[in-house]
Image (cartoon, rainbow, N blue to C red):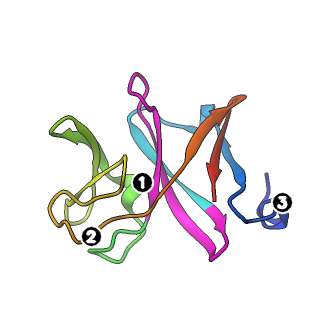
């Protein structure tokens, strides 16, 4: 899919194909551009095979550093919850809801994400 194709889609909560299953890296993140009603945003997609759910989509923007780096963070868990640690200042964000573990006032946006016919689909 090209960016022009994505922009031509109706943006009111539509499912957008962003990549294929083969583009994902197990236990790691990739960055993608998502078209939303508020304009394009960068998101981080995480693939955790063997975990339920196996796919997560959260903001790629780190609110502590101001950089788009979350997809490059280290995936782990805190108290049994899957998290990503920001690669810059090391704050942990829960993949399920974007909540920062160290600061309850900070939360990343999350998006619904599914795997459909080998394609990763995100609701924008």
Residue at the location (68% across, 29% down)? Answer: 118
Q: Quadrant of residue 54?
A: top left
Secondary structure, mark 3, is: helix
Please rate how many residues cluster around mark 2, counting C-alpha atoms within 10 Å: few if below 14, some from 14 to 19, many from 20: few
- Upstream in sequence: badge 1 or badge 3: 3
Horizontal side, residue 107 vs residue 4: left or right: left
Secondary structure, mark 2, is: loop
- Along the line of sight, the residue nearer the viewer: 70 or 112: 112
Horizontal side, residue 9 vs residue 93: left or right: right
Query: Which residue was labeled with disc 3?
Result: 5
Q: Quadrant of residue 24?
A: top right
The answer for how far apart the CA atoms under marks 3 and 2 are is: 33 Å
Please rate how many residues cluster around mark 1, counting C-alpha atoms within 10 Å: few if below 14, some from 14 to 19, many from 20: many
Residue at the location (37% across, 64% down)? Answer: 108
Secondary structure, mark 1, is: helix
Query: Which residue was labeled with disc 1?
Result: 71
- Upstream in sequence: badge 3 or badge 2: 3
Main SS class of the magenta portion in the image: strand
Q: Which mark is residue 110?
A: none
Seen in the picture, residue 2 relative to 54 is either above or below; the reply is: below
Query: Which residue was labeled with disc 2?
Result: 106
């Amino acid at each position: 899919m090209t960016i022009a194709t994505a922009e031509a889609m109706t943006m009111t909560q539509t499912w957008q194909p962003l990549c294929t299953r083969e583009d994902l890296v197990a236990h790691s993140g990739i960055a993608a551009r998502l078209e939303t009603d508020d304009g394009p945003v960068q998101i981080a997609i995480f693939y955790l095979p063997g975990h339920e759910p196996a796919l997560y989509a959260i903001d790629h923007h780190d609110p502590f550093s101001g950089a788009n780096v979350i997809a490059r963070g280290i995936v782990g868990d805190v108290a049994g919850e899957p998290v990503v640690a920001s690669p810059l200042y090391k704050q942990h964000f829960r993949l399920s809801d974007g909540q920062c573990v160290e600061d309850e006032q900070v939360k990343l946006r999350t998006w619904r994400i599914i795997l459909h016919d080998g394609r990763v689909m995100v609701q924008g």
